[in-house]
C-alpha cells in the first residue's frame, strides 16, 4: 500500500542537526574519508549523543499520539551525505534513543536537498551552512542549526517554536525597503499596505503544518477537557507599531495563527528568549542569532537581502570539502 506524504508535516533533518558529531567530523577533517568510514564502522554500535535539534524533533514526533499510529501527523526523514554503510550508526542511534524515524536518504557525498519536493518537506535542518544555503538558493525551506550550550529538560512535554517574521514567514520585500530607504520609508510603506498580505517566506508552509497539528490538539481538548495542548507558537520580530499590523494581517489572510506575538522594535531578542525558552527559534539575521544561540536552539534561515553575499572586488566563491557526517 502506498504511503502518502501529502497531508503530513514532513521535516528533513541531517544527522549533524539531530546528533552531536564533532568527534567523527574531526576524524574526517584530519584523516580523510577512508579513515572516517573505518571510524564509523568501528563505532556503529556506539550511540550518538543528542544534537541541537534533537529536543525539537523528539517533541514534534511525540505529537503523533494525536492520530492513528498508522496514519501519523508528522514524518521526520533523515537527509544525509553519508553513504548507507556509514549511515548505519545514525540509524542505530535513532533506534537506541527511541525516535520513531524509519525513513532516510543517504546520498554518499552529494547534497540531499534536491529530494525535498519529492518527499513533500516543508523544512530541512542541517548543521552544514553550505548545504542549507544551496537549498535556500534553490527555493527550498531550509535552516542552518547553530551550536548551543542548552540542555534538554525531558520532563517538559511542551514544544515551543518561535519565528521571526520578515525573511522567515514572509518574504524580504519590507527588509529591502528598509535597507534601501531607511526606517521612515519602511514604516510608511507598511502602513500604506497594512491591509495587504506579504508574499510568503520560506517557512510559511511549515507554520501551516504546525497549525494543522494545533487544530488537532484543539479537537482533542474539546473531547477531553483535561487535555493540555503541548504545541505553542510565538512570533518574535523587530517590528513595532504601526508596522505590526501588516504582519498580523498577513497571518490572518494566510489562514495562520500564533499563540504569542512580541513586537520588540529593536529590543534585544536574546533577553526575551531566555524567558520564552523555545525549543527552536528561526531568524534570517545572524546579528540576532549571535545573541540567542548561546542559550536557545537557534536556526539561521539564509534567505533574502539580509543574506546577500558580500564579496571583495575580484574575489570568487570559496568552498571546502563537506564532511559526510555534517549532513
Image (spheres, rainbow, N blue to C red):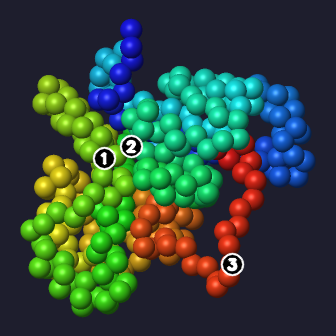
Q: Which residue position is annotated with label 1?
A: 205
User: Quick check: 270 above or below 199?
Assistant: below
Q: Residues within 10 Å of mark 2 (few under 14, many from 20)?
A: many
Residue 254 screen position, x and y as percent: 18, 52
Residue 205 screen position, x and y as percent: 31, 47
Does residue 279 appear anywhere in the picture? Answer: no
- Give the residue displayed 15% in from the left and 49% down from the top: 255
Name the element at disc 1. Answer: helix
Residue 140 screen position, x and y as percent: 44, 50
Q: Is residue 14 left or right of residue 308?
A: right
Q: Viewer-proximal residue, 245 or 182?
A: 182
Q: Which mark is residue 122?
A: 2
Residue 264 screen position, x and y as percent: 30, 76
Q: Which residue position is annotated with label 3?
A: 315
Q: Viewer-proximal residue, 188 or 248?
A: 188
Q: Which mark is residue 92?
A: none
Tag 2 near tag 1, CB within 8 Å: yes
Q: Viewer-proximal residue, 95 or 245?
A: 245
**N-term-proximal mark, 2 vs 3:** 2
Q: Is residue 12 left or right of residue 233?
A: right
Residue with the most extreme front position? 314
Q: Viewer-proximal residue, 160 or 300?
A: 300
Tag 2 near tag 3, CB within 8 Å: no
- Give the residue displayed 32% in from the left and 64% down from the top: 171
Question: Where is residue 305, by image quadrant?
Answer: bottom left
Amino acid at each position: 500500500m502506498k504511503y502518502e506524504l501529502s497531508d503530513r508535516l514532513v521535516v528533513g533533518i541531517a544527522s549533524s542537526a539531530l546528533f552531536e558529531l564533532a568527534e567523527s567530523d574531526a576524524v574526517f577533517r584530519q584523516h580523510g574519508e577512508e579513515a572516517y568510514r573505518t571510524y564509523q564502522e568501528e563505532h556503529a554500535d556506539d550511540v550518538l549523543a543528542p544534537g541541537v535539534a534533537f529536543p525539537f524533533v523528539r517533541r514534534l514526533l511525540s505529537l503523533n499520539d494525536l492520530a492513528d499510529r498508522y496514519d501519523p501527523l508528522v514524518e521526520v526523514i533523515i537527509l544525509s551525505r553519508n553513504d548507507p554503510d556509514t549511515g548505519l550508526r545514525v540509524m542505530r542511534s535513532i533506534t537506541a534513543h527511541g525516535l520513531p524515524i524509519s525513513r532516510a536518504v543517504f546520498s554518499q557525498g552529494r547534497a540531499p536537498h534536491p529530494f525535498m519536493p519529492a518527499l513533500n518537506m516543508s523544512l530541512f535542518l542541517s548543521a552544514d551552512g553550505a548545504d542549507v544555503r544551496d537549498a535556500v538558493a534553490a527555493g527550498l525551506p531550509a535552516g542552518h542549526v547553530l551550536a548551543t550550550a542548552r540542555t534538554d529538560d525531558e520532563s517538559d512535554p511542551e514544544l515551543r517554536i518561535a519565528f521571526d517574521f520578515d525573511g522567515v514567514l514572509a518574504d524580504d520585500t519590507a527588509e529591502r525597503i528598509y535597507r534601501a530607504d531607511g526606517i521612515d520609508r519602511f514604516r510608511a510603506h507598511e502602513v500604506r499596505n497594512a491591509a495587504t498580505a506579504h508574499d510568503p517566506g520560506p517557512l510559511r508552509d511549515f507554520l501551516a503544518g504546525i497549525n494543522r497539528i494545533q487544530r488537532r490538539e484543539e479537537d482533542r481538548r474539546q473531547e477531553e477537557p483535561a487535555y493540555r495542548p503541548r504545541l505553542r507558537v510565538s512570533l518574535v520580530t523587530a517590528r513595532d507599531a504601526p508596522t505590526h499590523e501588516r504582519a498580523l494581517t498577513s497571518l490572518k489572510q494566510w489562514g495562520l495563527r500564533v499563540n504569542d506575538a512580541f513586537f520588540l522594535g529593536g529590543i534585544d531578542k536574546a533577553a526575551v528568549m531566555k524567558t520564552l525558552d523555545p525549543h527552536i527559534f528561526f531568524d534570517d539575521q545572524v546579528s540576532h542569532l549571535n545573541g540567542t544561540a548561546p542559550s536557545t536552539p537557534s536556526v539561521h534561515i539564509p534567505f533574502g537581502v539580509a543574506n546577500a553575499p558580500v564579496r571583495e572586488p575580484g574575489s570568487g566563491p570559496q568552498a571546502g570539502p563537506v564532511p559526510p557526517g555534517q549532513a
